[in-house]
Image (cartoon, helix red, strand yellow):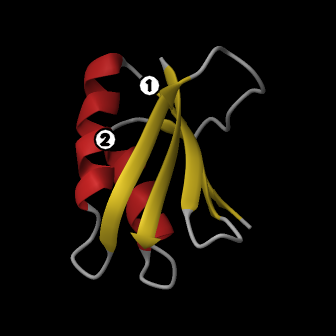
Amino acid sequence: MRVFFRARDRVQGVGYRAFVRRQALAQAISGWVRNEIDGSVTGQACGDSPALENFRGILRAGPSWAFVESLDWEPLNEGESLPASFEIRP
């Protein structure tokens, strides 16, 4: 399964992308995450359904120093290939 996600509110400048990467690697999820110009953080993730559902809850909670007001979560059809690991993109 593959998904697109977007986290909004206090998610930049607080280590949110590094947190997302650590959690993805712990769940054996591949993909990427990046900051957006509007202050949100977006990414794509690929893994099995149970791991992604757990990952979704983790992203919604975020690290203690972040605040996630909303988390968009959209299933995707296969598209561009994702990295074999999970990377932080500029």
Residue 42 placed where, x, y %?
A: 58, 53
Would residue 4 appear left or right of 54 to someone viewing this image?
A: right
User: Which residue appears at 55% of the width and 61% of the height?
Assistant: 41
Secondary structure at badge 1 equals loop
Camera-nearest residue between 48 and 42: 42
Q: Which mark is residue 39?
A: none
Q: Amino acid at mark 1?
A: Gly
User: Which residue appears at 42% of the width and 71% of the height?
Assistant: 9
Residue 43 placed where, x, y %?
A: 58, 47
Proximity of marks 2 and 1: CB atoms separated by less than 8 Å: yes
Q: Which mark is residue 55?
A: 2
Is residue 86 among what the camera can see?
no
Report the residue marked by disc 1: 47
Q: Is residue 28 above or below residue 61?
A: above
User: Which residue appears at 68% of the width and 33% of the height?
Assistant: 82
Marks 2/1: CA distance?
A: 10 Å
Camera-nearest residue between 41 and 52: 41
Camera-nearest residue between 75 and 70: 70
Q: Amino acid at mark 2?
A: Phe
Secondary structure at badge 2 equals helix
Farthest right residue?
80
For disc 2, the neighbor class at 10 Å (few under 14, some 14 to 19, many from 20) is many
Say whether disc 2 or disc 1 marks the residue closer to the N-terminus: 1
User: Which residue appears at 37% of the width and 19% of the height?
Assistant: 48
For disc 1, the neighbor class at 10 Å (few under 14, some 14 to 19, many from 20) is some
